[in-house]
């Protein structure tokens, strides 16, 4: 399972500084949000220059020499549009009113309708992404209204789904969060310089101070100063998976520390599904914090059982499920000395298809584990996501048509328990009505008739 993207925007009033380094380190801090491609668009006072390519931030930005005081950047994992260079971001748009660059985290649900409407108006597309659809709707509304920000507001009323955007227009950075606030977006500041990013970790790693989260429906226009405009917000619907899995543990999303949520999930998981064991362990890296919480609540010592190969890089992002299954042991090797003849509690963040956890359990038992009891810090995933997570068909989900007992048998665990929905909500600390839980409950914040569900 993968997230769609991470975005960043930097506006420096100190013209002696270069925004490129801030974008580089900020994207590096958010590499977990996308490993397929990345890029930067930078304004040097005269024009926007664009550089993007397939690969990791360290590869694409190597020896890059661009200068400017305003820039946006992007890391990508595809959920709409194929994984190829034409779909890398930022996207640069040239039209009769000038040009702008755009970077997008999320996924719009009325993509087909908007694309058909734009095609009828003669629009020609250069990518297969929904991000270009957003850009072209903004272009159309700008041309009609004569004002760029008014055009954005009108576009936001037409676009349905999830989008956190950074836009580079001349010397301005424009940051936009959709009216539901599905995906995070954070504002930071240092002196008179500003930064926006998908996660607070990207802001703090370049020594800026986090100011606040961008509000759902808000538009921030950043130049020498900053001003805020907005369209009416909808029901706030922050994706629960930002807390469970996607965001870095040291990030703070909508005022709530991700690390604390994951630790609390582990503690509650033990209270809901206690077990006697010799060792609490985790599937690295996403299960570690919840496992520490489980260990603290249970008194069972925490230890490593799987050693992660951290040098596989993007070459390990296999294009098909068979290759991913066969590669599990290359990525995660059992630590035989720590697990031999022990009863293990294995904590992970989620089970989607069940194939990876099945292989991990098999490998642990082959390495000498006496029993493997699985605890999952997210309730069963049963429904597709249309808001920017790469899980869009019901057939993918092992929990769709199986009971917990049947899943336990399928994956070869000695026992299996998931955190309850109430436990998840309690750990996050936000009211249920302010979270997107669609993949768990089938209750979509953007109405199904708008989404035209077919899967």
Image: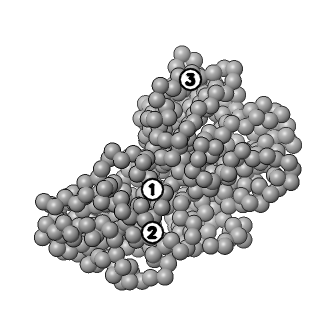
- The secondary element bearing badge 2 is classed as loop
Vertical arrangement, residue 211 with respect to residue 156, above or below: above
What crowding class fits label 1: few (fewer than 14 Cα within 10 Å), some (14-19), or many (20 or more)?
A: few
**Going from the N terminus, do you reach mark 2 or mark 3 first?**
3
State the separation of the CA atoms marked 1 and 2. 17 Å
Residue 155 higher or lower than 329, as above or below: above
Q: Position of residue 422 (x, y in %)?
A: 44, 72
Q: Which image quarter: residue 295?
A: bottom left
At a point 30% along the width and 50% down the height, the residue shown is 309
Q: Which residue is mark 2?
A: 352
Q: Position of residue 137 (x, y in %)?
A: 77, 48
Q: Are marks 1 and 3 in contact (CB under 8 Å)?
A: no
Distance from label 2 to label 3 (Cα)? Answer: 41 Å
Residue 430 appears in the rendering: no
Provide the secondary structure element on which disc 1 rests.
loop
Q: Write the residue at 69% across / 67% down.
A: 451
Residue, disc 3:
66
Q: Which residue is mark 1?
A: 318
């Amino acid at each position: 399972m993968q997230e769609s993207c991470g975005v960043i925007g930097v506006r420096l009033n100190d013209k002696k500084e270069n925004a490129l380094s801030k974008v580089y380190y900020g994207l590096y801090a958010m590499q977990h949000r996308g490993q397929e491609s990345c890029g930067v668009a930078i304004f040097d006072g005269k024009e926007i220059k664009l550089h993007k390519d397939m690969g990791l931030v360290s590869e694409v930005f190597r020896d890059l020499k661009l200068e400017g005081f305003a820039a946006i950047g992007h890391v990508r994992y595809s959920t709409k549009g194929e994984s190829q260079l034409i779909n890398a971001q930022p996207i640069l748009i040239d039209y009769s009113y000038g040009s702008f660059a755009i970077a997008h985290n999320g996924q719009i649900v009325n993509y087909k309708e908007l694309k058909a409407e734009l095609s009828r108006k003669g629009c020609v597309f250069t990518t297969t992404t929904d991000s270009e659809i957003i850009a072209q709707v903004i272009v159309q509304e700008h041309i009609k209204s004569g004002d760029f920000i008014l055009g954005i507001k009108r576009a936001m009323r037409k676009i349905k789904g999830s989008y956190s955007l950074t836009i580079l227009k001349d010397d301005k950075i424009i940051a936009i969060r959709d009216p539901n606030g599905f995906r995070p977006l954070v504002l930071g500041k240092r002196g008179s310089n500003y930064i926006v990013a998908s996660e607070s970790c990207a802001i703090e790693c370049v020594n800026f101070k986090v100011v606040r989260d961008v509000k759902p429906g808000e538009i921030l226009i950043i130049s020498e100063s900053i001003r805020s405009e907005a369209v009416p917000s909808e029901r706030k619907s922050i994706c629960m998976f930002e807390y469970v899995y996607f965001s870095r543990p040291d990030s703070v999303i909508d005022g709530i520390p991700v690390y604390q949520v994951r630790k609390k999930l582990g503690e509650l998981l033990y209270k809901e599904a206690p077990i006697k064991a010799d060792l609490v362990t985790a599937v690295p890296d996403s299960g570690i914090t919840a496992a520490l919480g489980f260990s603290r609540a249970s008194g069972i010592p925490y230890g490593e059982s799987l050693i992660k190969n951290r040098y596989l890089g993007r070459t390990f992002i296999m294009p098909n499920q068979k290759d991913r299954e066969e590669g599990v042991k290359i990525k995660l090797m059992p630590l035989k000395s720590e697990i031999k003849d022990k009863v293990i509690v294995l904590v992970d963040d989620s089970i989607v298809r069940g194939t990876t956890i099945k292989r991990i359990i098999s490998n642990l038992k082959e390495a000498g584990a006496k029993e493997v009891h699985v605890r999952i810090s997210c309730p069963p995933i049963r429904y597709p996501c249309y808001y920017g997570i790469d899980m869009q068909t019901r057939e993918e989900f092992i929990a769709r048509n199986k009971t917990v007992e049947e899943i336990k048998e399928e994956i070869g665990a000695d026992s299996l328990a998931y955190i309850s929905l109430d436990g998840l909500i309690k750990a996050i600390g936000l009211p249920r009505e302010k979270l997107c839980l669609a993949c768990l409950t089938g209750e979509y914040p953007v109405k199904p008739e708008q989404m035209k569900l077919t899967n």
